[in-house]
Amino acid sequence: MTGADFSLGDWIIRPQRCSIEHGNEFVRVKPKSMAVLECLARAAGDVVSRNDLFDAVWPGAVVSDDVLTQCVVELRKAFGDSARDAQVIETIPKKGFRLIQALTPVVRKPVTVSTSSLEAGRLRDKKKSWPVIRTLLIGAGATLLAAALFWHQSGLRKAQSSSDSDSTRTIAVLPFVDMSPAHDQGYFADGLSEELINRLTQLEGLQVTGRTSSFYFKGRNDKLRDIGNSLNVSHVLEGSVRKSENQLRITAQLIDVATGFHLWAGKYDRPLTNIFVVQEEIAEAVAKALTIKLGVGGLANVVGGTTNIEAYEELMLANSLARELTADALLKAIEHNRRAIEIDPAYALAWASLAGKYRVAYVAVFGSEQPNNWQQEWEKALAHAISLTPTAQVVLNEIAFKQLDRWQWSNVEQTLNQGAGLTGSADVQTMVTYVDFLVKVGRTKDAVVLMERARRLDPLNPLSAHYLGHTYAMQGRLDVALAEFERGFALDQIVPPLNIEGMVSALSAGDSNLLQRWLQRAIEHKQPGDQDVHETMAELLGNRETALIWLRDTYQKSASTDYYVAIWASYYGETELALKAMRRSPDPWLFWMPLMSETRQLPGFKELVTDIGLVDYWQEFGWGDFCYRVGADGFECK
């Protein structure tokens, strides 16, 4: 039974992942603790002595009783068990331990994958039915598309999951309308809406739709009932902002989507400097109208925020510019972000936001181009943010991206607390950050659970479709992956990484019509590093030998297209070339795609995952879905 999943009462134990699952929650334990649990499970309720546990888990090593005790303590904590009132692991005085709960094996359902063949003019000689997903600029895409450069949350909210009772209230904050005389305060109105989203997200029992989905309706005249149905919410908060010099007029209305009735409405005529107080008053009024009880500190002050209205305005303008997704706008955004910090050097969230913009500049737009060293600027801004508010979630997410860039897998787990609380959280950005990590270390099941929740919270965000489709494809669920990519394309047709995902999945599905559609989309919406790959591969479809000659020549000329060379070389069955490209430009986002399964069988692939630290991570936190331990020190990948 070693390594096989099994059930223990209501819990599911997954030794390969070192995880213990209960419903939608899961807890990770150390490998040695899992080995102790496996040993107890093999005994099927019989008592296992301490000596037998030492021999099985630490063969040949000298280990104190305290080490074993700590393993048992960790397991009991994971189960919510206790030594005094044991329900799972019982201590038998002077003898050892035994499991109380009944043990049964877990039978996995087979994965069904479309195996339709290409018609005449197939793209490859050897039939392959597995999808491969390509993504570029993963961290940058998360920041830009999810508009997460300005998150004012102090931590994860432990909200009820979508499967909870109907008592969970749901709300979407629509973009407030700019009613200023010159109509030039759109960024300020957007910023207010965003602040209200962040503040309401802190409330227990209130599920708040993510910003991207709410802002999908900006400038549109959809009926509230249609908006409610699209976002799956029962209430909508809408309003307007009129800003003239140093005076504000803010109106807000809370509306029941089903009836159209106003549950609450308010109008605020205040000096501009009172904007922070107004935000608080609106959030509290909404909570009261929805009969949500505010606990102690229910709407706490923003950690790392500012009381300086000029700094606040500069940052709102900076974030508004960053969402335009152009190089020029990003440079302007950085300048406004810098001004916010010049005005208030202690504005920690502005430092974290600046770090995110520098990361986008480095990863997605300019790379290492001079005159600016974007990577160094990223690190400096992040260091400032850490020095001011090291535990703010937006800062922790930025730290995690830095660690991902350096392949510091174990550090990411520690920074994001092993994803604790995310299955009940409303923090979509942290979910995406952690899923990006889960994908790269090969943990697809955990990734799918989080991304399905992220889609429920932010259904109109194309980033959700991008990530969720990718995780589905990793599992071999090609039909649902393609449907998710199509849904994302319908939301935003100019997301280059999403187009690549759909193109490669269609290529793997063997559907020539889908392939032509996604390939054309990829050609129309290029991204940095694409060069002429898509056009050339389109011209050479069905001509395997010529395509491989071009791929080998491209590999010799430059490393900038290694991602594509690896994909197409694997597609045409040239696994050695694929592995060479992967070794020169490692990107674990690609490693676990089904199309790469033959490449993963090569001895050099084991060297690759060892060199970039994944094996060390697996040995500490448990093995993923594609590589597994063999014997005491070996491992294999499938």
Image (cartoon, grey):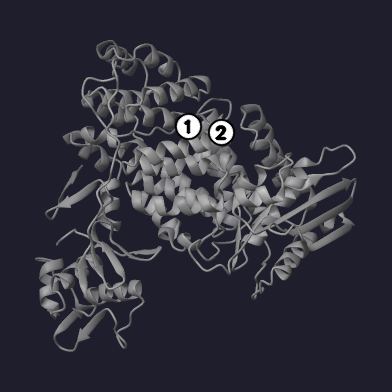
Q: Amino acid at mark 1?
A: Pro
Residue 159 placement (x, y as % from top left): 54, 65
Residue at 28% over, 57% down: 17
Q: Residue furthest front?
A: 259
Residue at 29% over, 82% down: 87
Helix, strand or loop for disc 1: helix
On screen, 228 above or below 147?
A: below
Disc 2 packing (10 Å; few <14; some 14–19; many ≥20): many
Disc 1 packing (10 Å; few <14; some 14–19; many ≥20): many
In the picture of the structure, the residue carrying the numbered disc 1 is 497
Helix, strand or loop for disc 2: helix
Residue 144 placement (x, y as % from top left): 58, 39
Q: Is residue 309 visible?
A: yes
Q: Is residue 343 visible?
A: no
Question: In this rendering, would 266 be left or right of 314?
Answer: right
- Seen from the viewer's position, the closer of residues 259 and 255 is 259
Callouts 2 and 1 close, C-beta under 8 Å: no
In the picture of the structure, the residue carrying the numbered disc 2 is 361
Name the front one of labels 2 and 1.
1
Residue at 44% over, 29% down: 500
State how far apart marks 2 and 1 are (Cα): 17 Å
Q: Amino acid at mark 2?
A: Ala
On screen, 219 above or below 292?
A: above
Q: Earlier in the sequence, mark 2 or mark 1?
A: 2
Q: Quadrant of the N terminus?
A: bottom left
- Seen from the viewer's position, the closer of residues 44 and 261 is 261
Residue at 74% over, 51% down: 192
